[in-house]
Image: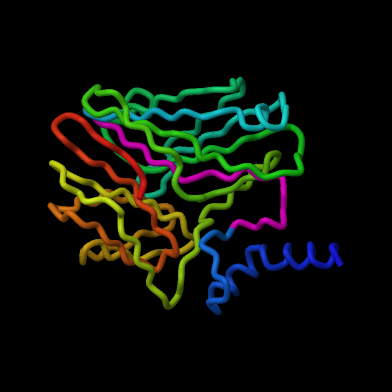
Amino acid sequence: MKLKLKSFNSLIRNKTAKKIRNLLNIKPSHLLFDYSKTGYSVSDGFFWRVDSDFKTIFKYSDILNIFYGEKTSKVLILIYDDKFNLIKTHQNNHIRDHNSLVIDQEFLKIEKGFGSFFIFHETARNLNTNIRNSCYTGYSFKNSLPSFVHGNLHSASKSFTGNKIEFGLGASSVYKKYIYQVQNNMEFDKTEIILINNCNSKINIDLNFLVTELDIGQTKIIDTKDNNIVKIKSNSMLIRPIIFNYRNNYIDVYHG
C-alpha cells in the first residue's frame, strides 16, 4: 500500500502531470519542476544591474558540503542580459562554505545593463537529493551600503553531474489571469518593479493598466510612475516581482 501511494505521489508530481492539472484547474501548481527525479540543483532567477551608480553583490553557500558533506562540489553561474542572451559564464571550482561575487562594470566588461543570472551546484557524485539555491543578492546604489534580498522564484534546474539546463520552471495559464498585489504602499521618491519571466512560455503582464509582455527568460524594469498601489495581472501563475524603492541616495530592495 505504501509503495502504491509513493508511486502515485511521484506520478502526480512530475512535469507532465502538473501541466495537465494546471490545464484542467485541478490542484494547479505554479512550479513545474519534476520531483519524481533526484540529483538536481534548482536555481532561482536572480536579478543583476550595473552602471555608474549600481553594482550587484551575490552571496552564496556551499550547500552540498554544508548539508551533505560533499567535498567535490563546485558552482556554475550563468549571467544573461535582459533579452536572455548569455553574456558571462563564471565557474568556481574552489568553493568555500560562504562565497561572494561582485557583479559590476569591470566584471562584465560593460558600461551598463541589467538581466538575470542562475547558479548551479555541481559534484562528481550523483547524489540522491535535490537542492534549491535561494541565496542573497545585494544592490549598492551610489556606493551606499547594499540592500540585500533573498531569491524569489524557482527558474531553472541542472543535474549535479550533467550539462543540460532546463529553464522555465514557472507555470503559466492558457486561459486564466492571476492578480498579484504588492503588499506595500509605494510612497517613495521613485519605485521600480523588476520582472523576470521564469515560465517556459511568453507571458502577458498588466501592471497598473500598463500592458507589456515578456518572452522566455526576459527581464524588465518598470517605473510605477507615482502609483502608490502596485497590482499585477498576468497569465503567469506566480509573478512575484522585485521592488526597488528610492529615497534620496538610498534604496530598499525586496521581493513582493
The answer to which image quadrant residue 35 occupies is: bottom right
**Location of residue 41 in the rendering, given as x and y in whole percent from the top left corner:** 62, 42
Asked which quadrant contains residue 150, the reply is: top left
Residue at the image point whose x is 66% and y is 63% from the top? 13
Residue drawn at x 72%, y 32% as measured from the top left = 68
Q: Quadrant of the N terminus?
A: bottom right
- Residue 39 colored magenta? yes
The verdict on residue 249 being magenta is no
Q: For this view, does 129 lie left or right of residue 54?
A: right
Magenta-highlighted residues: 33-51
| Left or right: 35 as drawn, with respect to 186 | right
**Residue 151 x %, y %:** 45, 42
Note whether 255 is above or below 234 in the view shown.
above
Above or below 194: residue 250 = above
In front: 174, or 65? Answer: 65
Q: Nearer the viewer, residue 169 or 201?
A: 169
Q: How many marks?
A: 0
Location of residue 39 in the rendering, given as x and y in whole percent from the top left corner: 71, 44
**Residue 28 shown left or right of residue 109 in the figure:** right
Residue name at image x 34 percent, y 66 percent? 179
Q: Position of residue 32 (x, y in %)?
A: 57, 60
Check the image and tell me how it is coloured.
Answer: rainbow
